[in-house]
Every structure is written in C-alpha cells, then in structure tokens.
C-alpha cells in the first residue's frame, strides 16, 4: 500500500509552548486512523499541520508526494487532495446546501451547471441528505449540518480526509448519524485521519489508533489496543474517558 | 426689498434640497467606491500598503470636513485647477466618505468569523474567491445598518458645501434669508426639510439592524 500521509519528527510551537514534540506516523491509502488523547495533547494541531493550517518549525510532512513544509508548496493543490471537516461545521450561512457543496468545485475545478448539480446530489446521497439540497444551514440540525460539511468536502474528491473532533458539538443521537456516515466512507475505501473522543467508534471503525500525550505519539496499535493499554498514561486516559 | 416668505421661496428651497440629494448621492457612490478600495487596502497582505492607507484614514478622520473643502476648493485653485463648486464639494465629500466607509467596512469584514475563511481556503479557494464568495456577502449584511446610518451623516455634512458657494439647501436658505430677514422661519423650514430626508433613513437603518439581530439569533 502506498503511503499517503507521512509525518517525521514534527515539532510545532505556539510561542513558548511546544505543542508537538517530535511526532512521527504514516497513513497508507485506504487506511482509517483515529488519533485520541486528552485536550492539549496536540492531536488537533497535528491534524491541522497536515493541510498546513498550521506551519511546523521542524521535521517533515509528506502528503500525496508533496512536502507540506516546503516554502514553494502549491497550497491549493495540496488542499484539493486533502479534505477537512471541523468541529464547528463552518458551513457558509448565506448559501444553500447545494451552493455550499458546489462552490469549490465550480471555482476551483470549473464544474458547471447540470454537472455541478449532479455532483451536489451524489455528495448528498452519500451522507443521506438528498431532501435538504435547497435548505439553508440554519434550517438544519447540528448533525445534518455536519453531514453537509462532509458532503462539501467529498465533492472535491479528496485523496485523504481529516476529521477534527467532528462530533464534539453534538448530542449522542446526532453523533450517531454522523459516525454512521463516516463508517460508510471508511468502508468505501476513503483514507481517513480523525481526531476523536468517541472511543467506541475509534475501536470499531479505525484500522489503527494513535494515542497522543504531551505532544508525542505515546502508543499506537489496532483498535484492540484500547482493551489492553500498555502505558499507564493511556490506561489512565481510558479510565477517565469511560 | 419685498418682505414676507412666499411660495416662490419655498420652491427655491426645494430646488436646493434637490441639489443636497444629488450631492449626497454623488458623494456616497463615488466615496463608497473609494471606500471599498480603502477597505481592501486595509485588509491587504502587504503591511506597507496597510500602513499607508491607515495614515490616509487617520489624516482624513482627524481633519474637519470644512478644512478638506477649503483645501480642495481654494488650495487647488492656486494651481490653476478650475473647480466648479459641485465638483469641489463632491471631491471633498468623496475623500471624507472613503475614509469612514473604508473603516466601517473593514470592521464588518473582520466581524465575519475567521473559521469561514479557513473553511473556504481548505476547499482550495483562492484568497480573492474566498473574499468574494464567502466573506463579502456575509460582511455586507453586517455592514448595511451602519452604512445607512453613515449616509445620514453625509447628507447633513453636505450643508458645509454652502461655504464654497454651492447652492444646496443650506445655501438656498441663506440666500432667501438675505432678502427676507426671517431667519427663524427660513432656517426652521430648511431644518424640517433636512429632517424629512434623514428621518426615513434613520428608521430604515434601525429596521435593518433589527432584522440583522433576529437572523443572527436564529443562526
């Protein structure tokens, strides 16, 4: 399997605070990786470095054969390959669901008219929201908004998708509907890296789980690792999560 | 000298009021266009450009409009630039509007959450596409009430154009008063006419603000 995302000894500081202290991991095509860890462990920052929402101080990040930290990086090409979904959805409130989805394909890939409409329909089918195509974001529940955000990202046909605590703002019922969409994507072969607090979901859906602690990859393994943690830190973390 | 206020004078005031509207509209349209450029420069990536335009804004905001008018009308006259009063007044008000509207609109653009820009740029939109398709439409909604409110200020400020001899409402009232010597009556009527122009705008601005607050609460 080809490596899609590769972090090597990544260091990142915000001012004097070193958030990432030598993070390394690889993600292969079609793999689903869950990053877990307590708040402040650097997991969201690691994710945001992958599509250069944050710049790193040292180390290297390679995504689909591109060096992310390179000064001459084609940022827009990188972001066509990497989709990201945020905790706060960040839909565009002045646009309908369809317009939210087709804005980037229209502007970036020059997709037009009927083709753009079909693209929106396909993306919405994938997240089970075909009937909401003309709605505005404020008319949707949080779970529905998050599914539209996933559809918006899918419409750019990314090679890898990042999920940054996408269910943290949702109640358990709405969390379920979003997680089901993500599981379906995972089964469809999408390469996914997700920062999550849903331990059950990480165990079920992820091929690999990465536990981050104090800016480092502390422990890594399959979902089963969550049943038999090796380090006291992970043991402690899991005990508090449940 | 015939005393007494007649209908003829009233028509003369209305004509002046017409020119007040023309001058306000001119100042607002041209000043708005310049203000848009000021706003773009203030959010530019170039620190030098940001600073340069910041200085421009500070100078204009820190100078009375009357002084700007004198500089434009008499100052440029020295260099042999022929300045019709409408042009001088329009140019001065344009400078005035560009600084204030530029700052009002910059504030509105910055009021759109950064996460919106982030989301758009993560979808590979360019900076310009992000501004045009995502940020500006949202900023425009926020900007409408204060912009209409500022229009009221501009409308009243056009009265200063009377000092360079442009016959708008205030100047028209002065002219009539010079022959009738009924300042209370004539300036009173002029005041009411200004009020008739400004009050509907104020009401509109407040209505827009209310509507914006409601839609925000729902969002």
Image (cartoon, coloured by chain):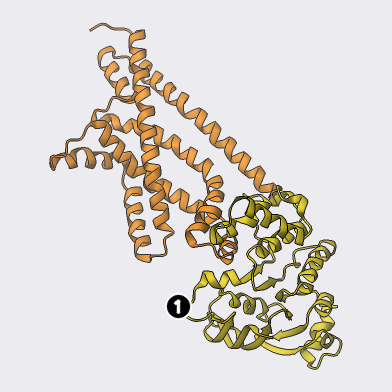
Q: Residue at x 30, y 40 (%)?
A: B92
Measured as percent of width and height from the top left, residue A71 is found at 46, 79
Measured as percent of width and height from the top left, residue A130 is found at 76, 53
Q: Look at mark 1 in the image and give the residue it sits on.
A: A72
Q: Nearer the viewer, residue B144 or A134?
A: A134
Where residue B90 sits, quadrant-wise, is top left
Relative to residue B57, is residue A147 drawn left or right?
A: right
In the depicted structure, whether residue B166 falls above or below residue A128: above
Q: Residue at x 32, y 44 (%)?
A: B95
Badge 1: chain ID: A
In this view, the residue farthest toward the bottom is: A230
In the depicted structure, whether residue B5 falls above or below residue B175: above
Q: Residue at x 61, y 84 (%)?
A: A20
Q: Nearer the viewer, residue A207 or A38?
A: A207
Relative to residue B200, is residue A209 drawn left or right?
A: right
Relative to residue A112, is residue A41 drawn left or right?
A: right
Relative to residue B107, is residue A133 drawn left or right?
A: right
Does residue B62 appear anywhere in the picture?
A: yes
Does residue B113 appear anywhere in the picture?
A: no
Chain B: colour as depicted: orange
In this view, the residue farthest toward the front is: A114
Measured as percent of width and height from the top left, residue A226 is found at 83, 85
Q: Secondary structure at mark 1?
A: loop
Q: Residue at x 67, y 57 (%)?
A: A119
**Chain shaded yellow:** A
Q: Nearer the viewer, residue B134 or B68?
A: B134
Measured as percent of width and height from the top left, residue A32 is found at 74, 79
Where residue A168 sits, quadrant-wise, is bottom right
The N terminus of chain B lies in quadrant: top left
Instruction: Report the number of discs.
Output: 1
């Amino acid at each position: 399997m080809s490596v899609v995302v590769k972090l090597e000894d990544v260091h990142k500081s915000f001012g004097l605070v070193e958030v990432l202290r030598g993070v390394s991991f690889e993600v292969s095509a079609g793999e689903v990786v869950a990053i877990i860890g307590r708040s402040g462990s650097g997991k969201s920052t690691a994710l945001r470095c992958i599509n250069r929402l944050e710049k790193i101080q040292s180390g290297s990040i390679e995504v689909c054969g591109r060096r992310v930290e390179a000064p001459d990086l084609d940022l827009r090409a990188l972001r066509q390959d990497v989709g990201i979904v945020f905790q706060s959805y960040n839909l565009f409130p002045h646009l309908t669901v369809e317009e939210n989805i087709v804005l980037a394909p229209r502007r970036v890939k020059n997709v037009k008219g009927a083709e753009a409409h079909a693209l929106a329909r396909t993306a919405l089918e994938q997240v089970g929201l075909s009937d909401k195509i003309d709605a505005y974001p404020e008319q949707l529940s949080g779970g529905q908004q998050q599914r539209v955000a996933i559809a918006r990202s899918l419409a750019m046909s990314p090679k890898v998708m990042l999920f940054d605590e996408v269910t943290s703002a949702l109640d358990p019922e709405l969390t379920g509907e979003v997680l089901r969409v993500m599981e379906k994507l995972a089964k469809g072969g999408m390469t996914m890296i997700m920062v999550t607090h849903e331990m059950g979901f990480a165990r079920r859906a992820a091929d690999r789980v990465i536990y981050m602690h104090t800016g480092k990859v502390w422990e890594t393994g399959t979902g089963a690792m969550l049943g038999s943690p090796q380090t006291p830190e992970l043991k402690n973390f899991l005990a508090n999560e449940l | 000298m015939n005393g007494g206020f007649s209908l003829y004078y009233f028509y003369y005031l209305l004509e002046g009021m017409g020119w007040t509207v023309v001058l306000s509209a001119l100042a607002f349209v041209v000043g708005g266009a310049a203000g848009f450029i000021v706003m773009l420069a203030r959010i530019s990536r170039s620190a030098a450009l940001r600073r340069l335009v910041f200085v421009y804004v500070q100078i204009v905001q820190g100078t009375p409009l009357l002084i700007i008018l004198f500089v434009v009308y008499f100052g440029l006259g020295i260099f042999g630039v022929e300045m019709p009063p409408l042009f001088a007044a329009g140019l001065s008000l344009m400078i005035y509007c560009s600084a204030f509207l530029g700052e009002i609109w910059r504030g509105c653009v910055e009021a759109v959450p950064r996460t919106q820009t982030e989301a758009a740029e993560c979808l590979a939109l360019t900076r310009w596409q992000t501004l045009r398709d995502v940020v500006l439409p949202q900023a425009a909604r926020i900007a409408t009430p204060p912009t209409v409110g500022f229009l009221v200020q501009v409308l009243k400020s056009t009265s200063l154009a009377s000092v360079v001899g442009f016959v708008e409402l205030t100047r028209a009232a002065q002219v009539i008063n010079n022959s009738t010597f009924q300042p209370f009556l004539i300036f009173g009527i002029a005041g009411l006419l200004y009020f008739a122009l400004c009050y509907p705008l104020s009401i509109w601005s407040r209505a827009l603000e209310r509507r914006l607050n409601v839609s925000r609460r729902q969002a």
